[in-house]
Image (cartoon, helix red, strand yellow):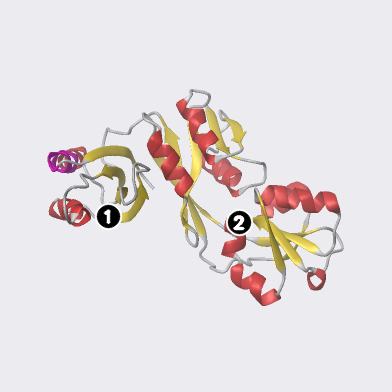
């Protein structure tokens, strides 16, 4: 089986991919951007992909849901939550007291904002935590550190000079597994709906939510994204999490479509 994930080597995406697909029959392919990862499935170059959906601190990864909804035929078939422990990586002989600047990808710098402010150090953004660490390694500098994972430190033979520097000790990233297969047999813990409403109706979101309430469907995640057609036009991503049966999902979809909304089931899956 061929699986795509967001590179380069040493990223949390790679760690999530190898933890989730932890059997021998997997061939991994790295891509530079989230759209490239998702397109690899749509274009048949791989069978599955794993991409980040949301982070405890950063919230939703908009690039993921925007790209996924634009690709007809792709589905969410599973999810995986990765605990995110962030460490300060440095070249050999570097001391914590000599670090005046830290490098990493923007979301990671955001997740360590308090730590960076408390230490009164500068920050510099890179395309990935791996590229920041690789640049640090190549430079040999002892006044700069990179923020990344323990596996990244091991990969590049960098020292960890301060551990668990993320602002939130419960920092996690939720990844979704994408394929062209929609799970239909049996009951699943989660179902993802994408609803593009009839914009002419007043109180449209309230009306949509009332349908789920009437069917006793609990929603654990709601996100709105612009449709890109005109200002003020949004579609809604709603994740149901109480073991909806296929019949209940079909009933919700039918009612919403009767009300004039476009409804797409983006996936049924388990935790």
**Nearer to us in this view, 239 or 244:** 239
- Whole-percent x, y for residue 124 in the image: 70, 59
- Whole-percent x, y for residue 136 in the image: 79, 53
- Whole-percent x, y for residue 77 in the image: 39, 37
Left or right: where 231 falls relative to 47: left
Left or right: where 57 falls relative to 227: right
Rendered residue at 13%/53% (across/down): 214
Q: Which residues are magenta?
A: 252-259
- Whole-percent x, y for residue 200 in the image: 18, 47
Residue furthest to the front in view is 230
Of helix, strand and loop, which one carries label 1?
strand
Of helix, strand and loop, which one carries label 2?
helix
Q: Which residue is mark 1?
A: 219
* Magenta stretch holds residue 173: no
**Nearer to us in this view, 15 or 22:** 15
Q: Which residue is mark 2?
A: 106
Q: Residues within 10 Å of mark 2 (few under 14, many from 20)?
A: some
């Amino acid at each position: 089986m061929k699986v795509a994930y967001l590179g380069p080597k040493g990223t949390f995406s790679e760690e999530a991919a190898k933890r989730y697909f932890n059997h021998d029959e997997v061939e991994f392919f790295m891509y530079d951007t989230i759209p490239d990862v998702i397109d690899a499935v749509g274009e048949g170059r791989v069978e599955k992909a794993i991409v980040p959906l949301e982070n405890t601190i950063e919230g939703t990864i908009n690039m993921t849901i925007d790209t996924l909804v634009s690709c007809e035929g792709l589905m969410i078939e599973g999810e995986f939550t990765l605990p995110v422990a962030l460490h300060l990586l440095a070249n050999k002989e570097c001391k914590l007291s000599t670090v005046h600047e830290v490098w990493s990808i923007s979301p990671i710098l955001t997740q360590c904002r308090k730590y960076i402010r408390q230490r009164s150090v500068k920050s510099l953004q890179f395309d990935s935590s791996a590229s920041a660490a690789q640049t640090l390694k190549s430079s040999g500098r002892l006044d700069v550190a990179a923020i990344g994972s323990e596996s990244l430190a091991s990969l590049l033979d960098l020292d960890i000079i301060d551990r668990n520097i993320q602002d939130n000790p419960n920092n996690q990233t939720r990844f979704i597994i994408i394929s062209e297969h929609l799970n239909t047999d049996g009951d699943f813990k989660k179902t993802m709906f994408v609803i593009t409403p009839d914009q002419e109706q007043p109180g449209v979101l309230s009306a949509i939510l009332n349908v789920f309430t009437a069917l006793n469907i609990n929603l654990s995640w709601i996100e709105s994204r612009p449709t890109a057609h005109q200002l003020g036009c949004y579609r809604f991503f709603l994740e149901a999490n109480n073991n909806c049966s296929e019949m209940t999902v079909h009933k919700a979809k039918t009612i919403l479509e009767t009300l004039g909304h476009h409804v797409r089931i983006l996936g049924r899956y388990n935790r």
